[in-house]
Amino acid sequence: HVRRHTRRRVGVRLLPPRRRELASIESLAQEYLRSAGLPATKPHEPVKVDPERGKRIAAAYDALPKFSRDSETLAAYSQFQREVEAQYDFLKEHIRFVHTAGDPYPDSKSMIADVRENRTLRVYMGGDPHPFLGKPGPDGLSANDKFRGVHDVFGHAMRGYQFGPSGEMNAYLEHSKMFGPLARKAMASETLGQNSFFNFAPQNIDKPPAQRQFAEQKAALLPDEFLTGNL
């Protein structure tokens, strides 16, 4: 999933939405959850990322194989793809998605404003192909392309979480509530794992974003210990 352009801001400040905008995007989330037979969600208290835990998650992600073909991984990614497709099909009736080959926004604030004010989201389609989610469908979009879109809406824009380490952690926590338990395992690798590598891998520590190495696209599951507990 992660291939954010390096110009995007990496601070931890949250952008609180206006009450009307929040209600509108959140109402879409709750409507989707009802249609999918999933329980309603509530906002969590924003957390600040723990760098030491981030380093452990980065190391765990780095140690994963490129494509793990065990039954649990295949089941998790298959279910994740189905739920991503369902979220995208639901959202495209309310949000105009524009898929672009270049960097669509100068920073997270611009992306969030476009979603809230214009009901439009421009989605970057570049980066390395994903070993499981990268095959284009009849519409020319892969599940990886679609996940970038729905995650920016439900993970970031709904509550104003920016693209820095803590913002990405909170976006993961927020959006993961909208997946079933099996799909959530794959979703964690695509967000929590890749973002932890980008922010906390040894080769990226103390480097500006433009000089950091992106995480390799993988289809493999993080250990369950990183999906629960004190984040």
Image: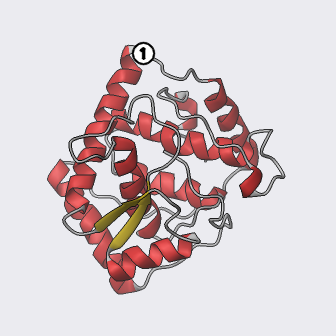
Residue 55 placed where, x, y %?
73, 40
Residue 89 placed where, x, y %?
21, 54
Q: What residue occupies the far right of the structure in this picture?
A: 206
Residue at 25% x, 40% y: name it: 137
Residue 132 placed where, x, y %?
39, 29
Question: Toward which corner of the image does residue 47 lie, by quadrant?
Answer: bottom right
Residue 46 vertical position relative to residue 112 in the rendered view, above or below:
above
Question: Toward which corner of the image does residue 223 lie, by quadrant?
Answer: top right
Q: Is residue 47 visible?
A: no
Q: Nearer the viewer, residue 27 or 103?
A: 103
Q: What residue occupies the far front of the structure in this picture?
A: 101
Q: Nearer the viewer, residue 14 or 144?
A: 144
Residue 90 placed where, x, y %?
20, 58
Amino acid type, callout 1: Arg
Residue at 34% x, 50% y: name it: 146
Question: Is residue 98 toward the left or the right of residue 197 in the image?
Answer: left
Q: Is residue 72 visible?
A: yes
Residue at 44% x, 28% y: name it: 131
Residue 168 vertical position relative to residue 180 in the rendered view, above or below:
below
Residue 12 vertical position relative to residue 218 in the rendered view, above or below:
below
Q: Nearer the viewer, residue 29 or 3?
A: 3
Crowding near the residue tagged with mark 1, few <14, some 14–19, many ≥20 C-alpha atoms within 10 Å? few
Residue at 59% x, 62% y: name it: 163
Residue 192 vertical position relative to residue 87 in the rendered view, above or below:
above
Q: Secondary structure at mark 1?
A: loop
Q: Which residue is mark 1?
A: 69
Question: Is residue 41 toward the left or the right of residue 163 in the image?
Answer: left
Q: What residue occupies the far top of the structure in this picture?
A: 70
Colour scheme shown: secondary structure
Count how many numbered circles sit on residues in the image: 1
Question: Toward which corner of the image does residue 166 lie, by quadrant?
Answer: bottom right
